[in-house]
Amino acid sequence: MIFHFSISADDPKRTATMFAELWRGQVFYFPMVGKGSWIAHAGDDRRTTIEVYPRDLAFYPNESGEGHQRNEPVSRHGPFHAAVGTPLSIEEVEEIGRRYGCHTILCNRGPFRVIEFWVDNAQMVEMLTPEMQAQYQRSVTPDGFRAMLANVWKLTPEGESLDGAVAA
């Protein structure tokens, strides 16, 4: 279970404010990590938050357990993404995306749908409306994933081909 995650953004305050809107939550300055960082609170029963850091802030492990911070050029794109619930409708999410200049697109992921919401048009967050959350909860289970691998991809849970072909 994920309680919070962090992302980088061109304008951390603006991005944290946007997430607070998507959750009907609140936004606060976040001085604990990285100058110029902000945090969006969903205000839900899990205390869900998203920490938003300046785009060029990088963390490195160190012996203190707090992580060494330094500013350096980083890619605007990468494989990280998250599926995030919202109490809003598809139209409300799309409207927030328009106001903040974020590319949004309704996508079918097979057994569930998501709204791809591109923060700074560089980092994807899959937004799930209440209906989408229910679809996700019903389908994203170990048994559901095992069935998808077998029926759609013709693979075992270990990535081996069910039809004898070599898996990629």
Image (cartoon, rainbow, N blue to C red):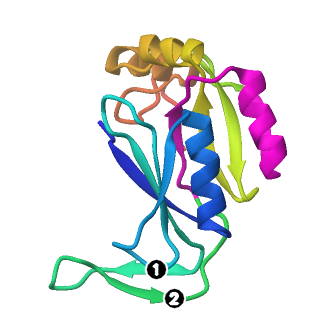
Magenta span: 79-106
- Can the viewer see residue 166 in this picture? no
Q: Secondary structure at mark 1?
A: strand
Q: Is residue 66 left or right of residue 68?
A: left
Up/down of 83 relative to 144, above or below: below
Image quarter of the C terminus = top right
36, above or below 82, in the image: below
Q: Residue at x 57, y 55 (%)?
A: 16
Q: For residue 85: magenta? A: yes
Residue 134 is situated, as x and y percent measured from the top left of the image, at 49, 12
Q: Relative to 76, say whether 132 is above or below.
A: above
- The x, y position of residue 1, in whole percent, is 29, 36
Contact, CB < 8 Å: mark 2 with mark 1?
Answer: yes
Name the kind of residue labelled 2 in the image: Asn
**Residue 40, position as x, y percentages in the image:** 49, 50
- Where is 31 relative to 100, above or below? below
The residue where tag 2 is placed is 71
